[in-house]
Image: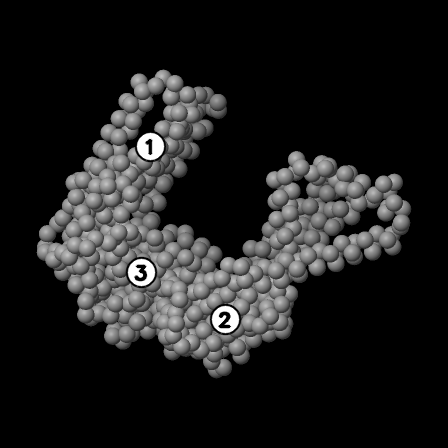
Amino acid sequence: MDGEELTPLHPNYVKVVRLNTMVFALPFVIAAIVLEFAGFLPRGAFLLPMLLVALWLIIRVPLRRYHARGYQMGDDRLRVVRGLIFNSDTIVPFGRVQHIDVHQGPIERAYGLGTLVLHTAGNHNHSVALPGLGHADAMAMREEIRAHVKRETM
Amino acid sequence: MTETAVVAAPLPSEEWRRTSPMSFVVSAIMSLSKGGLPALAAIVGSGAWGMGLLVLVPTLAALLAFSSFFSFIAWRHFRYHVGDSDIRVERGLFSRTARSVPYERIQDVSLEQAFIPRLFGMVDVKFETGAGGKDEVRIRYVTAEEAEALRETVRARKSGEAVVAGDAEATPVAEPARTLFAMDFKRLLTFGVFEFSLVVFALLAGAAQQFDFLMPFDIYNPEEWIRLFAGPGHRLLELGVGAQVVGVALALITLALLGLLTGMIRTVLRDYGFRLEETPKGLRRRRGLLTKTDVVMPVHRVQALKVTTGILRRRWGWHGLGVVSLSQDAKSGKHVVVPFGQMDEIAPVIGVTGFELPPANAAWQRSSPKHKVDQALLGVIPLSLAAAASLAIGNLADAPGPWRLWVAAGFAAAAILVLLRENFLWRHDRTALDARHIFAQHGWLAPKLDIASRVKLQSIEISQGPLARRRGYANLTFGVAGGTFAIAGVPLGEARAIRRAVLDSITGVDFSRLGEIEG
């Protein structure tokens, strides 16, 4: 199953990551503006680099992260691939799932997305999160995994 | 924990439920008693107490209103659903989390009544699953009848499948037992020798730091020490080099004796009367001189084994055996079952746990040579730079020649050690699979052997950093209940092959045996 194509995340995921990054970058940009007007250094010495970095983080990085992520829903396992610089490729067999969460943050809700979280009994990867799914898709995946847990134990 | 004697009918399904309306009042009071009491202490501490009730009453009222408001919101947005195949819990106002817990995964339902909820007749219901994180599922608070009904419903829906005994660490067992491993006093003392420890000096240093004001002299002043050791009139200094050498030798011998003694005492205290038995309930371990412990580890809960050794003890073939087991309480999942024994004593214990040592014809695979080269370079390059820099800075600062040479030599020696280590690791770190297990041997001075059962692994992750991706190797990390199992620097293709093989054994497992496996 390694060779098979990954399913890409919902396109709205890029927007969600951008908004999250904006929220994160806002205090730094404000700080840069304050320092700019405090006039310690020549004009633009704080603001310009800060704005460039912020723009790169907001426009470019989320797109690359989106392309680095993906998943593969098998009959009996879920594969989650993520990471730009530090890449990880995790497989959770449904038979090892303890319980399942579908989480929605406020920004995710605005774009109709959800995060599927599988909890396992392992110390490492005790919860494997797959963000950027359509909320309905996440719910459907949850049902499928839950049905599998039931079938398998019977 | 209080059990109510109410016999309740199973709850009807297909209906979302809220916790009792009283529960937000209880939560508010609970959070007030957590957050409010420190606030009260702050008020008293700041002297506002003097202003009397004028300040105190409005402050308390505001705190109560504040926490009630949040508790109300939390209560309003919390609901649960007792379905045919799972229990669902939804919570959150801005961030919503919907959790589904299949009945098959619920190991126990515990009802808890703390003091304040008890006053209101409220119960905190906890569903225990085997999830690795401490992220349990709870419903706070419901009435005692509702709690009992919830528990009955879960038990009824679960019925038909084998219910595994909940308590992993039960105490007394009175069944016939077979001794697997025991240590006599001679073995204990031998063990103590290898447990050589200078921890007593760390303790002394710590104590000295705490109580330095009690010392008769300033312990941070080296001249005081010289005066103390040299004695009045520098008697020792005048005795010449020979006497000084004898002095140093004496000091070293004292150090060694103290280290030995510490190791012996600690070992005897911990492992006196060590006895490992096979009982129908599992492996039973008893040990301890002053604090005696008695632990029972059900065999089906053992997830992985670790064979350990030490730098010196391995020369005489001494090893230890630890089991990683799924324990439901918060205690550590790792237990020593053979602290100090020869491999021919350890092998039968491994057999009892249902695991095996790697077979003689195991297809061992080495890790990627590129990984070891990269690791060596990551150590050697900074150390060489440091050596060069210390030479250069020594020159600039006009430091005495021998000094900068010694420092540079120190860095160079460290670099050589790094090279030797990575070379050794490349030759000795290895991994093998057999039909039921995965084996990994790793480590330089005290190599360890990890043995995991393939079907008991919970998840498999292949991860790569930037270097690893460029050079085509990866780290392989398995999710083990109660422990860790990771293999570093596996060639990517091989990592994928191992993952495929392990997944095949996990998903191909005979389902009727799952209850036993997952325990």
Q: Find residue B359 and report its horizontal and vertical position in percent.
A: 47, 80
Residue matched to label 2: B275
Judging depth in this view, the residue of B42 and B102 nearest the camera is B42
Q: Quadrant of the C terminus of chain B?
A: bottom left
SS class, disc 3? loop
B180 relative position to B54: left or right: right
Look at mark 3 in the image and give the residue it sits on: B130
Residue at mark 3: chain: B
- Give the residue type that dot 1 points to: Gly
Secondary structure under tag 1 reads helix
Residue type marked 2:
Arg
Mark 2 vs mark 1, foreground winner is 2
- Tell me: B33 left or right of B430: left
Question: Residue B478, position in %: x, y?
Answer: 39, 63
Count of residue discs: 3
> For the residues marked 1 and 3, what is the alpha-carbon distance in whole angstroms?
34 Å
Residue B36, label in figure: 1
Judging from the image, mark 1 belongs to the subunit labelled B
